[in-house]
Image (cartoon, rainbow, N blue to C red):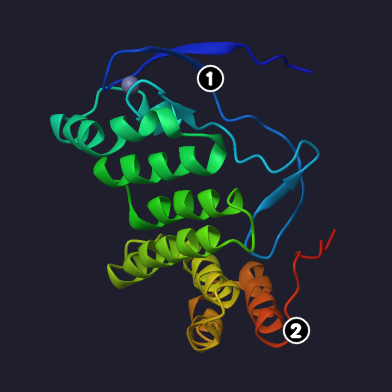
Amino acid sequence: MVSIKGHHYTCPVCKASLTGPSRPLSTSVLKRRTDLKPITSHGPICGGIIFCGACGYAGFHTDFEEVSAHVITKVRQYLTKRAPAVQGEADKYIHAAKCAQWLGKPDHIIGELWLAASWYAGERSHRAGKLRNNAIFFFERGFMKSSIPTNKRSIFCYLTGELYRRNNDMLSARMWFTRVPDEVLNENQDKYIQLAQQQLTKPKEYIESTG
Ligand SMILES: [Zn+2]
């Protein structure tokens, strides 16, 4: 058992001193929900978001390096006044998603942060639905710009369908689910075809482990 010591970071926006994990916490994932939310023995942990309560900047440890003046301006303008009200993981992921956009990260990475925010927002809440919509927006833009890595297109295609399904938009869900076979690269990815078919016809809450 390795004990995780806090690592010191300097906020690249406001220079505040922060303590956070030096790398994402590694906990074993017991199972995943069909929107890929990981369930672990310690609750759902995606791990590793470091949040600066002084200015509202948030990101993974690799984001705590020098940032551009553009990022600093955006954080100051949009996040600093909201920072004191941040409570819990959903809020932190929302801040991280906005920062990721200003940092110029790929759309599917920004989408994943919105998705993670939705995992913490209470599954059936109106808020979770809005956060899923934001994730969908960035995943779809990633497909439009062909910026999603080829070997990840099938899973993001499935996931976009599943988020639409969870938002009760079955027409869009069907469109993305039925596109999954076209995005599959090799037989290792056939599971996403089956998953899409399952969620289209007899949706389940959790992905059944295949061992
Ligand atoms: Zn800061």
Mark number, residue 22: 1
Q: Is residue 168 visible?
A: yes
Q: Is residue 104 visible?
A: no
Tell me which amino acid carries mark 1.
Ser
**Residue farthest toward the right in the current orientation of the protein:** 211
- Residue 38, percent from left and from top: 68, 50
Tell me where residue 63 sits by quadrant: top left
Tell me which amino acid carries mark 2.
Lys
**Callout 1: few (<14), some (14-19), or many (20+) C-alpha neighbours within 10 Å?**
some
Please determine whether, in this image, residue 207 is positioned above or below residue 90: below
Tell me where residue 33 sits by quadrant: bottom right
95 or 71: nearer the viewer: 95
- Residue 100, percent from left and from top: 34, 43
Ligand 1 position by quadrant: top left
Tell me the element at label 1.
loop
- Residue 181, percent from left and from top: 55, 82
Which residue appears at 32% of the width and 40% of the height?
A: 99
- Residue 62, percent from left and from top: 40, 28
- Please state, as top left, top right, bottom left or bottom right, where the C terminus lies in the image: bottom right
Mark 2, residue position: 202
For residue 116, side relative to residue 193 (left or right): left
Please determine whether, in this image, residue 49 is positioned above or below residue 134: above
Q: Earlier in the sequence, mark 2 or mark 1?
A: 1
Which residue appears at 33% of the width and 45% of the height?
A: 98
Tell me the element at label 2.
loop
Please determine whether, in this image, residue 113 is positioned above or below residue 195: above
Give the distance between the C-alpha atoms of the residues marked 2 and 1, in whole angstroms: 41 Å
- Please state, as top left, top right, bottom left or bottom right, where the N terminus lies in the image: top right
